[in-house]
Amino acid sequence: MIRRSGFVVAMVAGAVVVSACGSGGSDDGPEAAGNPSSAGGAPSAAASPSAAADGPVFLGPTGYGTVQLGMSRDKAEATGLITVKTEPPGAMACGTFDLGKFPQKKSSAGGYFSAELGIASIFAVEDMRTPEGIALGSSAAEVEKAYPELRKGPNASSTVVPGNPKAVYTFLIDGGRVQELVLDLAQQTCHN
């Protein structure tokens, strides 16, 4: 079982138990829907993931640097930005990866992938923000202002990603602050 602040992936009889179902993804990732508009005029997801010296590191609207949602595992590994952490336990299951510059604790992952979906989820790390300026530690009010269509849930809140209708941002807000931020394929099947 992998736990991430409210997200759980459990292994039952060699299969991954998930709460969502669907299909999607391709080797080439989702079609770009243009540059999102944002309060800060932030650049698109093509911004360098090593932008610490050059500026902020962005998560979204289609991925992290050259790692794109829906991209095959092989193509994602070829970018040099991810390191596979665990292999999928079956054909329909999901494996985990770390963002090379931002390794996670042993029991956590930087993201999920599957043969069916490719890159399905990317978890934000410190100093990473959405093009709309939301990061770990942002207030609930800042999230609601940046994403007026935010759907609040009992465990997590989510919204369609501006500029990419095939993706959602998922927020775990606790104590009035963002504790976890994930860029997911809208139909991902790797975690709930």
Image: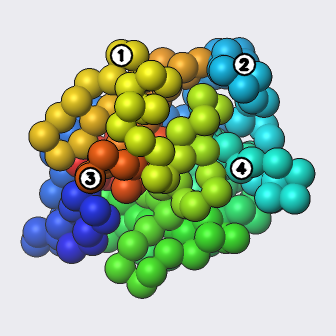
Asked if disc 2 and disc 4 are in contact, CB closer than 8 Å, the reply is no
User: Visible in this render: residue 48?
Assistant: no
Residues packed near mark 3 inside 10 Å, few (<14), some (14 to 19) or many (20 plus) = few
Residues packed near mark 1 inside 10 Å, few (<14), some (14 to 19) or many (20 plus) = few
Q: Pick the residue in front: 55 or 101.
A: 55
Q: Residue 42: horizontal and vertical position, in percent?
A: 75, 29
Placement of the N terminus among the 4 image quadrants: bottom left
Q: Secondary structure at mark 3?
A: loop
Q: Say the numbered circle drawn on residue 57.
A: 4
Q: Secondary structure at mark 4?
A: strand
Residues packed near mark 2 inside 10 Å, few (<14), some (14 to 19) or many (20 plus) = some
Residue in the picture at 46% in, 52% down = 137
Dot 2 amino acid type? Asn
Residue that protrudes farthest toward the bottom in the picture: 106
Q: Secondary structure at mark 2?
A: loop
Measure the C-alpha gap from mark 3 to mark 4. Answer: 25 Å
Measure the C-alpha gap from mark 3 to mark 2. Answer: 32 Å
For label 2, the residue is 35
Marks 2, 4: nearer the viewer: 4
Total numbered labels placed on residues in the image = 4
Marks 3, 1: nearer the viewer: 3
Q: Say the numbered circle drawn on residue 175.
A: 3
For label 1, the residue is 149
Nearer-N-terminus badge (4/1): 4
Colour scheme in the image?
Answer: rainbow
